[in-house]
Amino acid sequence: EVVLTQSPATLSLSPGERAALSCRASQGISSNLAWFQQKTGQAPRLLIYDASNRATGIPARFSGSGSGTDFTFTISSLEPEDFAVYYCQQRINWPPTFGQGTKLEIK
Amino acid sequence: QVQLVQSGAEVKKPGASVKVSCKASGYTFSGHAMHWVRQAPGQRLEWMGWINAGYGNTRYSQKFQDRVTITRDTSASTAYMALSSLTSDDTAVYYCARLGTGYYDLWGQGTLVIVSS
């Protein structure tokens, strides 16, 4: 199975700053990667699919890039509601797998 | 309103079984696959299996192959996930998730299952 490794584990930033999160796959997955946001006590929410496409209703400050084994998720200017845990997920290799998450916390 | 509503929290003893429901509304239930994902405390999300809500065929993770059964009732627009031979390691929040255009675009609110003697 494909192992997804996210870094950093925790990222401490202030509102207005730019956040960049990494997801590395143990083998190539082309662009078959999604990013989810999860707030405490809530279900994950799809933000980005196919590595770089924003899901319906997702603000333009969220973006994704990469292909193959290295992917980046970026929030251009952090809003207070963006502080949460972010997961990457691959779908091309069975079974679907998720990264261990990056916690984005307020500095 | 497009949503998935899951059944409530469960407390089970080791060795018991649990069955979680996931009721869909606001879209054509049989037109989308339904997947089940769990999240144990402090752990990453873990895929368990899925069902083709139209035809009813299923596929399970090897890890849960012997213990999980996913079914659906199209007349009730509801999917079910049953897990048997529970241990404390099965304590987790269980989610149903709709497969949209290849990705999980709609999630249930989660069902907490606690396994404790």
Image (cartoon, grey):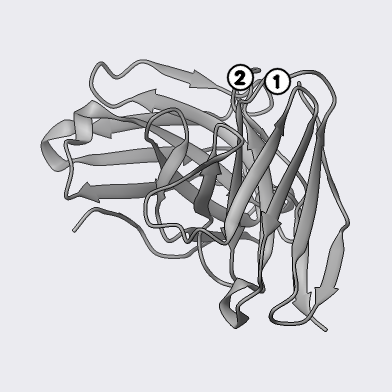
Rendered image: mark on residue A57: none
Front residue (pair B68, B58): B58
Residue that carries the numbered disc 2 in the rendered image: A92
For the residue marked with disc 1, what is the amino acid? Ile
The answer to the question of whether label 1 and label 2 lie on touching residues, with beta carbons closer than 8 A, is: yes
| The image quarter in which residue B15 lies | top right
Residue A31, image x, y percentages? 63, 25
Residue lying farthest to the left in this orientation: B75
Asked if one can make out residue A96 in the rendered structure from this viewpoint, the answer is yes
Rendered image: mark on residue A29: 1
Front residue (pair A45, B30): A45
In whole angstroms, how far apart are the C-alphas of marks 1 and 2? 6 Å
A76 sits to left or right of A45? right
Residue B37, image x, y percentages? 55, 42
Residue at image position (50%, 60%) is A43
Residue at image position (39%, 64%) is B8
Residue lying farthest to the right in this orientation: A8
Label 2: which secondary element: loop
From the image, which quarter does the N terminus of chain A lie in?
top right
Asked if one can make out residue B45 in the rendered structure from this viewpoint, the answer is no
A87 sits to left or right of B76? right
For the residue marked with disc 2, what is the amino acid? Ile
| The image quarter in which residue A30 lies | top right
The 10 Å Cα crowd at callout 1, few under 14, some 14 to 19, many 20 or more, is some
B94 sits to left or right of A83? left
From the image, which quarter does the C terminus of chain A lie in?
bottom right
The 10 Å Cα crowd at callout 2, few under 14, some 14 to 19, many 20 or more, is some
| The image quarter in which residue B42 lies | bottom right
Front of the two marks 1 and 2: 1
Front residue (pair B46, A88): A88
Q: Which chain carries label 2?
A: A
Label 1: which secondary element: loop
